[in-house]
Image: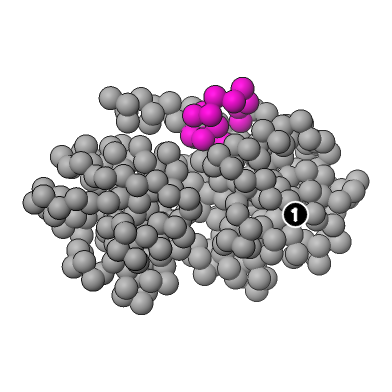
Amino acid sequence: MNRILKAGVAALGLAIISTGALAADWAPPGPIKMMIAFRAGGGADTQARLIAEALEAQMGWKFIPEQVTGKGGVNLLATMKDQPNDGTVIGIVVTESVGYNLAAANAGITPADFIGISTTAGFQMGIVSLSSKGWTTFADVVAAAKGGQEIRFGVMSPKLADLAYLLGKAQGVDFNIVSVKGGKAVMNGVNAGDLDIGFMAGIQAKGVAAGDLVNLASGLSTPLNQTPDAPTLADLGVSFNSDGYFVFVGPAGIPADARDALAQAIAGVVSDETTKAGGIIKKAFGGSATITGDALTTLMANDYSDAGALMDAAGE
């Protein structure tokens, strides 16, 4: 993953240099339908709408946001598959949508049916609890579980449920894995005492900074920015992780000049912290992470192919 991310950053730099003229020459032949795989009013929906607002102001393009939610982004992908591929239909999902969720759905579509345009931000996925529980490390949670305490572990996707199961297996404990809808529901459950720990993908940052929440572990292949001393899943005996990004995709076959123009414009907005979109991404995720071109194609394909290995491991 580190190699792919570095390659993606390099690819983005090359794209900005080499496709500037193409991007300047391309204009959408009509309004751009922006499909959004997240519930209205949430953080991801707000991010998408602020990006559209900035692009309308900077580029003069017209956007029509449209909610297409359900099945972890798979409903959006199924709807998008046969839409026009002239750059007038794009959608924001997460890389997990085009990876694990698409593989699990067995819906007859694959990442090859779509083209990656640009990521916007990576997740800061932590395993979080209330500070008031007195746990300061994940080892404290494991000790509580081995002492007979039921640990209710909140997750918001099947992939995270698999990771929670494998984490318990690696640590020799059985978690009560509770599936809820969205990261906010996980945080609300933890804050209310209905959940003991849970995966949160950046939404916990304010609570951690205030001392109300604690990141007990990183769900990523790398340490968390806010809590770099928290162990990763690999440190805890799990060879998989929840690395992922928000990503704009379109139907396969979008012309290169359209893809490059869209990617350059989106990456420019989210990387500029003076824009509302860039500001919210900085606040929620620590800054933008833009991967485009061949590196993004590789990332999406790898996420899809790796999903089977995770499912197999969780099924043993």
| Left or right of residue 114: residue 302 | left
Can residue 68 be seen from the camera position used here? yes
Check disc 1: other Cα within 10 Å, few if <14, some if 14-19, many if 20+: some
- Does the magenta-highlighted stretch encompass residue 107? yes
Residue 80 on image: x %, y %? 72, 37
Q: Which residue is mark 1?
A: 65
Q: In this view, which residue lies farthest toward the right?
A: 29
Can residue 214 be seen from the camera position used here? no
Please give the range of residues in magenta.
98-111
Classify the position of the N terminus by image quarter.
top left
Residue at image position (35%, 66%) is 191
Residue at image position (31%, 75%) is 211
Residue 52 on image: x %, y %? 74, 59
Q: Residue 115 lies in what quarter of the image?
A: top right
| Colour pattern | one colour
Q: Amino acid at mark 1?
A: Pro
Residue at image position (42%, 72%) is 206
Q: Secondary structure at mark 1?
A: strand
